Image (cartoon, rainbow, N blue to C red):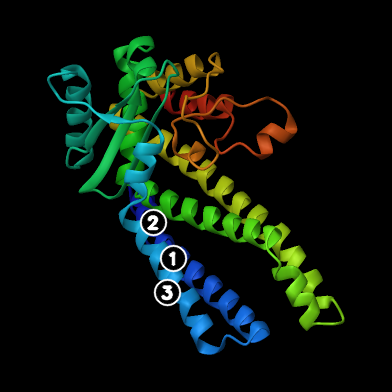
Amino acid sequence: MNNLNQQIRSNVFQSYVWMVVLTTAIAALGAIFSYFFSWGLTGTSVFIIIAGIVNLFAYFFSDKIILRATGAKPISENQSPELYEIVRTLCVSAELPLPKIYLIEDRAMNAFATGRNHNNSAIAVTRGLLERMSHDEVEGVLAHEISHIRNYDMRFSAIISVLVGFISLLADMYWSSQVAASVQEKDRSGILAIIGVVIAILAPLSAMFIQLAISRKREFLADASGALLTQKPESLASALNKLSHDVRLPTHYSPATAHLYFSMPSGVGFIERIFSTHPPIEERIKVLNSLSKK
């Protein structure tokens, strides 16, 4: 429990650290552009304001955008009393308020949690998950997602998603604009233009690998936390095993939201493993099976 509390504090702290990193990076970019294009402090200030807007957007609105992008619709307790009962029981055990519950009309078996804190959170499940998994398996998956809420993973993931997306957007703007050519004109030696090209290539790749590493670590933690909530790690392992035989992706799947889902089918090759947002399912099952033997 102490390790879990430490991880929660670390997630909260790292969320704010990454917001500072984003602001600093964008401000530095603004300063560089302002220097070469003689924009002065006005140019730098504009970039800092943009950074602030991005941070506010990530903090307050990312969950709404994610829910809309995945096709999730609110579902009432009258429509799905069993689902509400499972979530309510798990939230009591986790000492959390009941999150908003959404349904995705999709045959794929999946779920995700989103939101900025314990009082502003949501869980979305697919129709396929409810229809094709047993009660205990659904409970295991939902315990995993509630653990993400309790651990503040969803806010951290949202901020990282915006960071990765914004860096990728800047890289796309760099390649599609005349910035590189303009910088080269200012710098006859071409050194700064070469540096700009390297940054434009490496920045989104570096951000993506940070996202992948962070996502995998938090999936293992949410598995363990979820198993503690239900005291039935074998149920979560069974759900993962069932998912390992289903290669269907959610209809509204996109790389920007892949890390949010409970699990993502991936190939067994080396390249697929490197670029997967989740640890290999067999490794997650192995860890859960080791917990059930204790």
Q: Name the foreground residue: 257 vs 188.
A: 188
Judged from the image, the secondary structure of the residue bearing numbered disc 3 is helix
Residue at 77% from the left image edge and 83% from the top image edge? 186
Q: Is 84 above or below relative to 43?
A: above
Q: CA distance from mark 1 to mark 3?
A: 13 Å
* Label 1: few (<14), some (14–19) or many (≥20) C-alpha neighbours in 10 Å: many
Q: CA distance from mark 2 to mark 3?
A: 14 Å
Judged from the image, the secondary structure of the residue bearing numbered disc 2 is helix
Q: Amino acid at mark 2?
A: Ala
Residue at 44% from the left image edge and 49% from the top image edge? 157
Q: Name the foreground residue: 178 vs 199.
A: 178
Judged from the image, the secondary structure of the residue bearing numbered disc 1 is helix
Q: Pointer 3: what residue?
A: 49
Assess whether mark 1 and mark 2 are in contact (beta carbons under 8 angstroms). yes
Residue at 29% from the left image edge and 27% from the top image edge? 230
Question: Does 254 sit left or right of 86 as displayed?
Answer: right
Q: Amino acid at mark 1?
A: Met
Q: Pointer 1: what residue?
A: 19
Q: Name the foreground residue: 233 vs 91.
A: 91
Question: Does 196 sit left or right of 158 as displayed?
Answer: right
Q: Sequence-wise, which precedes: disc 2 or disc 3?
A: 3
Assess whether mark 3 and mark 1 are in contact (beta carbons under 8 angstroms). no
Q: Is 210 above or below relative to 75?
A: below
Q: Amino acid at mark 3?
A: Ile
Camera-near label (1 vs 3) is 3
Name of the residue lying farthest toward the left: 78
Quarter of the image where one finds residue 125: top left
Q: CA distance from mark 2 to mark 1?
A: 9 Å
Q: Pointer 2: what residue?
A: 58
Q: Position of residue 78 (x, y in %)?
A: 12, 19
* Label 3: few (<14), some (14–19) or many (≥20) C-alpha neighbours in 10 Å: some
